[in-house]
Image: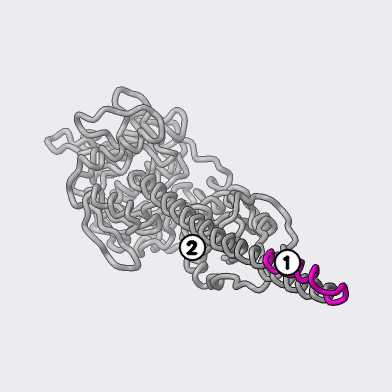
Amino acid sequence: MNAPNTTEITLRSRIDALRTLGRPLDIAHAVGILVPLAVELADQHRQGYQFFVYPGALYEGQDGNFHASQLSAQPPTDPRDAACLPPESRGSLPGTGHASVYAIGAMLYELITLGSVGAGMRRPSELVPGVPAELEMILSKALVSDPSHRPDDLNALAQALYQINASIAAAPPPADVGHLDHDGGFDVDVSLSMLPPAPVGGGRPQVIQGMGAEAPLPPGVQAPPSSGGDNLLAVKARLEADPRPRYVVVKHGMDHGPFSAVELLQQIASHTFEEEDIVRDAVGQSEYTIKDSPDFSPFARHARMGRHEKAERAALHAAVAKESRSTTGKAVFGLVALAALLVGAGIWFMTARGARSDRIAVVEEQAANVESDVGLKVKKKSGGGGVIGKSGGFPMLGGGMSCEAAQNAYVEEMKMGSPQGQADLTAGQFQAVLGNGTYLNACGVPDSTSVRVCAAIQNGRAVGVTVSTSPSSPKINSCLSGRVRAMSFPSHPKLDVTRTTF
């Protein structure tokens, strides 16, 4: 393997350039890159070498082909590079031919779709028009999660890819293509593939809210209509059909479980686990956050919405009860004031005009004082919009605004002489959520990009978000804004504004 040169182009930099343009590589050029690479890796494995294969460790040589550098001896640090490693390596173990077959499949998937292999991935034919069925079959076999059910013959893989498109790539050495299919008595179990299964009957796979293709339904369970609620019922039925305790949840650095799918759904519904917690699938050899799971994310999203609605109802009931007590107090003070006025009027008729005048002045002053204690209100200057109601004297914002618009729309009603409720939450409590920064990877933010986030938080959710990047990227801004709006923050009825910079 050759030492990397910082001035040379890596396959990762080539993919990043394609992602910036929003233009995946065509299949012919992708095959032209990976066929000679597979042949070279096969020769190195025959010499007894084991290494990591990922785009950041592959440099473009003077012959126009990509070659493994000395970085292949080290595990990757870029999450997208880590997605090209097979599950058995755990990001720390160099691999043999089995691992390199997986890496070639993962890099091919990323080149032609600009997406990474993992939870929520979709079939290339759903993302790119004209992807041959033969290519998807090769990918499904190369991306089998269990190495004992995955081919290891890189020459056979190169020959199979070359047969799909032979117009650019140089022909690889002859190989037994059947070895990739393992027709000689050892079948590849494509049900263990990271690539979603092909739809039955040639139709397109069902997709839940853009979260990726569904796995096949259990025997005896019919596919539901296309409405969102029925899709959730279908996913639930499929999960209930698997009783194995296969899921471990990592929360606050501690492992919980293992759980069956039904047990995990119950834990999510009871808010024990939330969208940011990590799930490890012992059977599929994968790891992802609950919000990135095509199976569990819809249920976690519903649980979060239910939690927010419950908090809002509790706040509304508390506001109604407080207003009721305030109304009763005002009525009592009003009766006292009326009685004082009646007494004053009687005294006025029974005493001399001068004494009557003095008495009336005293009564009026008393009544005015009573009114100021219970009825005088001062409002801040209002601005903006988006207020959908009030709760406990605080305006309730509807969300979907920018951070600045939320601040302008928030008009807190101040009552003279009365306490203003509990103190606002600290900046540290919000930074624990917003400052985490894991959502930057989900939106593909390059290391060279500066990100500024302003979030207006009320009742545990971001009702106003403003994201700016340098250099500016509207696509990244929109993605990060959506991620921040989906986060769960500490709940407080007042509006808090927090800012962070990456």
Which residue is identified by label 2?
Answer: 491
Front in this rendered view, residue 342 or 95 = 342
Residue 333 seen in the figure: yes
In the displayed orientation, state which residue is furthest to the top.
Answer: 201
In the displayed orientation, state which residue is furthest to the left.
Answer: 185
**Residue drawn 27% across and 64% down?**
255
Front in this rendered view, residue 93 or 486 = 486
In the rendered image, which quarter contains the C terminus? bottom right
Vertical placement of residue 29 versus 341, above or below:
above
In the visual, does 461 lie left or right of 360? left
**Image mark for residue 354:** none
Dot 1 amino acid type: Leu
Vertical placement of residue 174 versus 370, above or below:
above
Q: Are marks 1 and 2 in contact (CB under 8 Å)?
A: no
Which is more foreground, mark 1 or mark 2? 1
**Image mark for residue 341:** 1
Residue 469 in which image quadrant: bottom right
Dot 2 amino acid type: Ser
Which x, y percent locates residue 73? 34, 63
**Residue drawn 47% across and 68% down?**
432
Which x, y percent locates residue 134? 33, 30
In the visual, does 40 lie left or right of 319? left
Q: Which residues are magenta?
A: 337-355
Which x, y percent locates residue 299? 36, 46
Which x, y percent locates residue 417? 66, 74
